[in-house]
Amino acid sequence: MKDILRKENNAIKLGERLLRNSVKRFENNHRKGTKKMAKRLSEGQIAAIEYLALPGKGGLDYQQIAEKIGVHDRTLLRWRNDDFFHAALTRKIVRDTTERLPDVLASVPDHIINNGNAAMLRTFLQAHGLLTERVLVDNKGGNESVDMDEIKAEIQRLKDDGTTTE
């Protein structure tokens, strides 16, 4: 039981630290990108982002959103396929969900412990840019394979000689 509580406490502390770092990174990126975004997005695009960022698109389909903002549905499709528009939409969604992040992170340990659902935490953190993928490092030694028995024997020889600093 103590181990479970310790893991839960560590997960909460990790979540809080990640949240603080995420908010700082988001605020820095937002300050840098706000002027640029306002210059590049039209009023229609900004309105479309407001609808598209709502949970379930506010109960509207793409054609209804296009009608509400006064554009053709193909225009909305073209915007949605535009990288700059998509990035602005993603920033809006993250900005709108960031305030709920502490509540979600606080509930995660219970889900992990009760349901064994650690993948939920990983997915949520990745969606908010808080978790990066693992980076593999190549061995710069070329094609030479490492002989673990040889390494262990060398360590033992050094220990026997008394040349280690243990």
Image (spheres, rainbow, N blue to C red):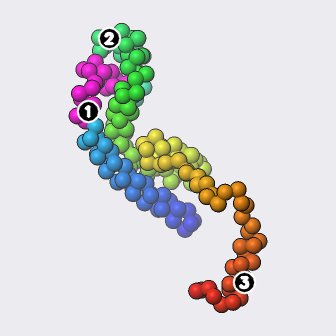
Q: Is residue 37 left or right of residue 166?
A: left
- Of 69 and 26, which appears nearest the observer? 26
* Residue wearing tag 1: 36
- Chain part drawn in magenta: 34-53
Q: Is residue 148 above or below residue 82?
A: below
| Residue furthest out toward the front | 142
**Image quadrant containing the C terminus:** bottom right
Tag 2–tag 3 contact (CB < 8 Å): no
For the stretch drawn in magenta, the main secondary structure is helix
Q: What's the residue type where badge 3 is placed?
A: Arg
* Residue wearing tag 3: 157
**Image quadrant containing the N terminus:** bottom right
Name which quarter of the figure residue 152 lies in.
Answer: bottom right
Assess disc 3: are there few (<14), some (14-19) or many (≥20) residues with their C-alpha within 10 Å of its C-alpha: few
User: Looking at the picture, how far across and down is residue 78, in whole percent?
Assistant: 40, 17
Assess disc 2: are there few (<14), some (14-19) or many (≥20) residues with their C-alpha within 10 Å of its C-alpha: some
Q: What numbered label is drawn on residue 2?
A: none
- Of 144 and 56, which appears nearest the observer? 144
* Residue wearing tag 2: 71
Instruction: For residue 53, say whether it is visible.
Output: no
Q: Is residue 65 above or below residue 166?
A: above
Q: Is residue 61 left or right of residue 116?
A: left
Q: Nearer the viewer, mark 1 or mark 2?
A: 1
